[in-house]
Image (cartoon, coloured by chain):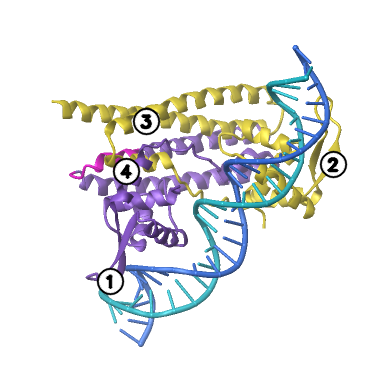
Chain colours: A purple, B yellow, C cyan, D blue
Amino acid sequence: MISRTDAAILGMLSIEPMSGYDMKKFSEQSLAHFWHESYGNLYPRLKRLEANGMVRGRRERRATAPDATVYRLTAAGKRRFREWLEEDPEPERIRNEMLLKVFFGAQASLELCRDRIVAHRREQETTLERYRAIGDLAAGADDRPDAVFWLMSLRRGILLTEARMRWCDECIRTIDGLNARGDE
Amino acid sequence: MISRTDAAILGMLSIEPMSGYDMKKFSEQSLAHFWHESYGNLYPRLKRLEANGMVRGRRERRATAPDATVYRLTAAGKRRFREWLEEDPEPERIRNEMLLKVFFGAQASLELCRDRIVAHRREQETTLERYRAIGDLAAGADDRPDAVFWLMSLRRGILLTEARMRWCDECIRTIDGLNARGDE
DNA sequence: ACGAGCATGTAACCTGTTACATGATTAG
DNA sequence: CTAATCATGTAACAGGTTACATGCTCGT
């Protein structure tokens, strides 16, 4: 029994020893386009993983910041993570609130729907910029054997974001077309 | 205080009176590409919504099936749903397990990663076929004012699925390229 | 008579979020 | 000195899934 959060923790530790705080940062930076974690989940999970012998934490002095409990994978933890890697991922259970609002859009005004999609399109633009920045970062680390995989996962974010932008553009054209008809 | 499930329920009822069972079916058919519901969540929520005066259920005889408790929106429920429609959707908290496995792919074999992506690509193909079927269905109902919105939400599924397929193709090429180098 | 689909529910559980609380260290 | 950042935690809660239990009705 290993939760998705447990797997993410083991995965991050497979790259580098980290504190809970570090993991939060890492998820916000490197995993941001497909994963996130909260402290309220991270810390209790770390305790449990340690109790189960998957990780071991050690208090460490840090050069430029307060002490931190840095966790490392144990042999068992490494093994468990590899097992998890081989298991088929369970299908995502998507729940897209914005799309739900679009679907029921007839209940509200066309303007609202249009504004929403314009805002969505703007969000995609900033997202895309963030991806480019991450890409530059990852490209710098291409000596690591991980780099190819990091770039692959990032590439997916880029392609999907571009597709979302195209969708927004289509929708806006459609809505404007409807308005033009209505105004005649 | 209205949960996302509550909103989905009110939304479905804004289209047509339904039983809990009907809602599950509806979510599996018309909302499947961006939403899902389970009985274990639906039924208790319906009770709560009725207690709060948002919906009213009535036992009804059905022509070809057992009796069912069919729910309708009350005036308050309709009002509440419109309010919800106007609120900004909260940002999605994505957690894509497959991508997590790709990201940490260096820890396992290239073959595993490749197989995973090939499987993913196959899933997208069947998904795309399902979308086309839904599209035909929705196109038949274009007298409804909802139809445009249904098609817009569906269109997003199609564009994203196509983008995912392109990503798979790219990845497979990349991986095969790595293998070719390694074999030299 | 029987299987498939219709129909409703609940209890146990897991997962994860939010809000709050606390304190250390360092750069300006 | 003080703001920002580092660092850790917990309690209350919401939200949702799974597994189980039950019974009806229709077509064959």
Looking at the rendering, which quadrant does residue B117 occupy? top left
- The amino acid on which the numbered mark 4 sits, given as a three-letter code, is Phe
Q: Residue at x 44, y 61 (%)?
A: A44
Badge 2 crowding class, 10 Å Cα cut-off, few under 14, some 14 to 19, many 20 or more, is few
Which residues fall within the magenta stretch?
A143-155
Find the distance from the CA under tag 1 to the CA under tag 3: 41 Å
* Tag shown at residue A180: none
Q: Residue at x 42, y 31 (%)?
A: B163
Residue A100: give x, y in percent of width and height: 61, 42
Secondary structure, mark 4, is: loop
Residue A26 belongs to the span the image colors magenta: no
- For the C terminus of chain B, which image quadrant? top left
**Any part of residue A157 in sight:** no
Q: In the rendered structure, which disc, 2 or 4, sits on the residue that comes first in sequence? A: 2
Find the distance from the CA under tag 2 to the CA under tag 1: 63 Å
- The amino acid on which the numbered mark 1 sits, given as a three-letter code, is Ala
Residue A148 belongs to the span the image colors magenta: yes
Of all chains, the one bearing label 4 is B
Q: Which residue is mark 3?
A: B117
Q: Is B93 placed above or below A63 here? A: above
Residue B150: give x, y in percent of width and height: 62, 33
- For the N terminus of chain B, which image quadrant? bottom right
Work out whether disc 2 and disc 1 sit on a shared chain. Answer: no
Q: Which residue is mark 4?
A: B104
Q: Would residue A2 be found to the left or right of residue B28 on screen?
A: left
Q: Is B137 placed above or below A154 here? A: above
* Tag shown at residue B58: 2
Badge 3 crowding class, 10 Å Cα cut-off, few under 14, some 14 to 19, many 20 or more, is many
- The amino acid on which the numbered mark 3 sits, given as a three-letter code, is Ile
Q: Main secondary structure of the magenta part?
A: helix
Q: In the rendered structure, which disc, 4 or 3, sits on the residue that comes first in sequence? A: 4
